[in-house]
Image: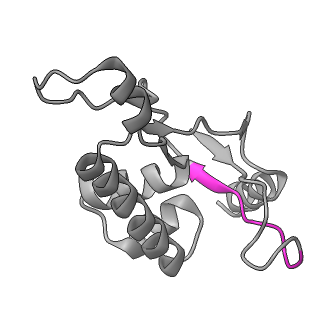
Amino acid sequence: MWWVKLWGPRRRGWRGRPPKMRWISVIPPVYRFIPVPLNVPTPPWLEQLATPPPIILQPDELEALRLVDFEDLTQEEAGKRMNISRGTVWRLLQSARKKIIRAILEGHELIISPPFHSPGPPTGIDKIKEKTDEEK
């Protein structure tokens, strides 16, 4: 299991609080999905012009999709597992589903962005675990 911290511009620029670390439990073995066109011959020059840009799926979007759609968890349970709110899970699901449907219907390449992970949980989680162990 990995903690993932996604850096970059926030919702309204670089101000505000930093993003929370998100819990990603599965890293997929495949990072690219390339569409195979129908068996209609097209000239090579047209293929280069008609290639749509790839769509990039973030690892937290994939994790939210996996927890809710594949493991049949509620959005609230998925949020607890990922250490984020239910509303954030909803936004991640909406974004991931839209990207996947667009890639399928419009023939875009789908790339799953590799996660930036740290080797273990943050120090605050270690302190919480130590306190719960001492109480028992």
Residue shown at 28%/56% (left/top)? 101
Q: Quadrant of the N terminus?
A: top right
Q: How many marks?
A: 0
User: Residue 5, percent across and down?
Assistant: 72, 52
Residue shown at 10%/23% (left/top)? 39
Span highlighted in magenta in the image: 15-23
Question: Is 121 placed left or right of 97 in the picture?
Answer: right
Name the magenta segment's main secondary structure: loop
Residue shown at 32%/71% (left/top)? 74
Question: Up-down: is 68 above or below 122?
Answer: below
The one nearer the camera, 125 or 4, is: 4
Whether the magenta-drawn stretch holds residue 21 is answered as yes
Place residue 114 in its image quadrant.
top right
Question: Up-down: is 51 above or below 6?
Answer: above
User: Residue 83, percent across and down?
Assistant: 59, 64
Place residue 7 in its image quadrant.
bottom right
Residue at the farthest left position: 39
The one nearer the camera, 130 or 49, is: 49
User: Residue 52, percent across and down?
Assistant: 42, 42
